[in-house]
Image (tube, helix red, strand yellow):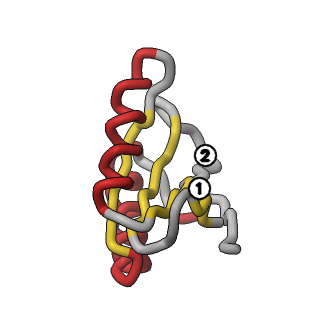
């Protein structure tokens, strides 16, 4: 599911938590502009005092499918997960 904040042109994929455990839920947030997406990531970074986003990625929407696959691969390699550890959230 895409949490459409201001649009769907730029998507941010985030797995919340310092050391996430399976099943992994990748949250996706959508923005109309790159600057809005960067501002959101800056807020996530500043909020790390209270909560930790283990890893995130910002991509242009038309590149999202390939980038999401790359993001999953990075998580698999970093945290020793496999494809079955991801749970599907769906899309609106």
| Extreme-bottom residue of the structure | 62
| Extreme-top residue of the structure | 49
Of the image marks 2 and 1, the number of the one nearer the N terminus: 2
- Which of the pair 79/47 is nearer the observer? 47
> How far across and how far down the image is residue 4, in percent?
59, 63
Contact check, label 2 and label 1, Cβ < 8 Å: yes
Residue at the disc numbered 2: 22
User: Residue, x 45% and y 62% (percent of image)?
Assistant: 31
**Mark 1 Cα within 10 Å, few/some/many (few <14, many 20+)?**
some
Name the side, left or right, on which 47 lies relative to 22. left
Q: Secondary structure at mark 1?
A: helix
In the rendered view, tell whether residue 47 sits above or below residue 32: above
Residue at the disc numbered 1: 85
Q: Secondary structure at mark 2?
A: loop
Quadrant of res 35: bottom left
User: Residue, x 46% and y 49% (percent of image)?
Assistant: 14
- Which of the pair 70/83 is nearer the observer? 70
User: Residue, x 56% and y 54% (percent of image)?
Assistant: 27
> How far across and how far down the image is residue 36, in percent?
37, 54
Distance of label 2 from label 1 (alpha carbons): 5 Å
User: Residue, x 67% and y 65% (percent of image)?
Assistant: 88
Quadrant occupied by the C terminus: bottom right
Quadrant of res 21: top right
Quadrant of res 69: bottom left
> How far across and how far down the image is residue 63, in percent?
34, 80
Quadrant occupied by the N terminus: bottom right
> How far across and how far down the image is residue 37, in percent?
37, 54
């Amino acid at each position: 599911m895409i949490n459409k904040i201001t649009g769907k042109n730029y998507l941010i994929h985030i797995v919340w938590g310092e050391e996430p455990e399976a099943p992994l839920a990748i949250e996706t947030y959508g923005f109309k502009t790159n600057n809005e997406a960067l501002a959101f990531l800056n807020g996530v970074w500043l909020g790390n005092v209270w909560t930790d986003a283990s890893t995130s990625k910002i991509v242009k929407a038309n590149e999202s499918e390939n980038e999401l696959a790359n993001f999953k691969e990075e998580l698999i390699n970093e945290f020793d997960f496999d494809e079955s550890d991801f749970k599907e959230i769906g899309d609106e």
